[in-house]
Amino acid sequence: VVVGIVMWRQPPQHQEWKGAGTTAHFYEIILGRCYTYTQIVRPELGHKDCQKIGKAFTDAFLSKDPCSSTEQDYQPLMELTNQTVPCDKTLLWSKTNELVHEYAWVQRELFTLENTLLGYMADGLRWCGDPGSPEMNYQSCPDRWKDCSNNSVSVFWNTVSKRFAEDACGVVRVLLNGSVHNTFDERSTFARVEVFNLHPEKVHTLQAWVMQDIRNISSDSCSHASIKNLKLILSKRNITFTCENNYRPIRFLQCVKYPDHSSCRSKI
Ligand code: NAD
């Protein structure tokens, strides 16, 4: 009689964090997005090695403390995903996630970070590892406010946003939200990272388009205090600042969604 010994393997015990865990099928998603981007969206990047890129991505955070992530962790990934954005085509944003990507979808030559390979791969995903396990933590990941700011996701966005701004040249545009109290939010990635990493030798102008919610149009957003603050920061950095309220081409996109609104009814 053979007596089988059943070994119960405990599920890996990960540390518990206050934020949601790694996105299910994270690895398959980033790999699929890498192939979609390099084969279909931008076939000129067809030579990129997605297997290598996927491995460099997970190597950056697996088996590590998700609250002590560093720019260095992401360096190999950054080196494999370098990409040139033409001058005058960089589009930054803050608090306008949906609208900016609708606009970039129409104006195909413009690049938001999410229209570059690395931004495209990571957009909307969550990930973290655990020092005591070689696996991803699908149960929980650090919340950036309640647990730690140097978490694997935040350090990633800080690192890629920094490179995106450093690489920009010519006129840089930013799409801001004029319907929130902090249109230029000092805690945002745009304010903390991107503004300070534009190179004045290459970027002569930052052009802001401040869009208001079409259902709730108020006075000129460009004269608001937070925009004055942005203007001051840029003048100290020797970058010209221009600001346009409710830029017409983007207003038309808002009108697609609310065609009956009074500000959309006038003849073009
Ligand atoms: P925002 O406040 O509208 O934030 C945009 C999104 O990014 C939100 O979902 C926010 O939760 C997340 N985010 C921002 N900073 C983060 C951080 N440190 N850690 C984790 N998530 C973070 O606008 P923002 O902060 O100015 O960021 C937008 C600008 O920065 C853009 O110009 C873009 O190039 C870059 N960026 C993009 C993403 C993204 O999720 N695609 C995230 C961060 C930064």
Image (cartoon, rainbow, N blue to C red):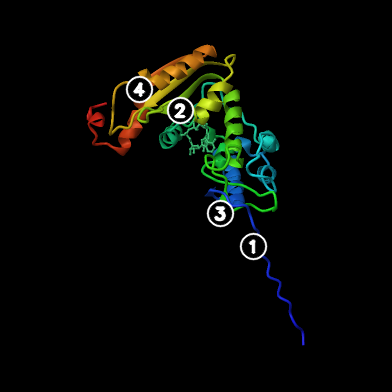
Residue occupied by mark 3? 24
Q: What is the C-alpha distance between the residues marked 3 and 4?
A: 40 Å
Give x and y (percent) for residue 69: 65, 39
Residue occupied by mark 1? 11
Residue occupied by mark 2? 185
Q: Quadrant of the N terminus?
A: bottom right
Amino acid type indicated by mark 1? Pro
Q: Earlier in the sequence, mark 4 or mark 2?
A: 2
Q: Earlier in the sequence, mark 1 or mark 2?
A: 1
Q: Which mark is residue 221?
A: 4
Please tell me whether mark 2 sits on a helix, a strand or a loop: loop
Q: Earlier in the sequence, mark 1 or mark 3?
A: 1
Q: Quadrant of the C terminus?
A: top left
On the question of residue 260 being in view, the answer is yes
Q: Earlier in the sequence, mark 3 or mark 2?
A: 3
Give x and y (percent) for residue 249: 36, 27
Residue at the spot 30% in from the left edge and 34% down from the top edge: 255
Disc 4 and disc 2 in contact, CB within 8 angstroms: no
Q: What is the C-alpha distance between the residues marked 3 and 2?
A: 31 Å
Please tell me whether mark 4 sits on a helix, a strand or a loop: helix
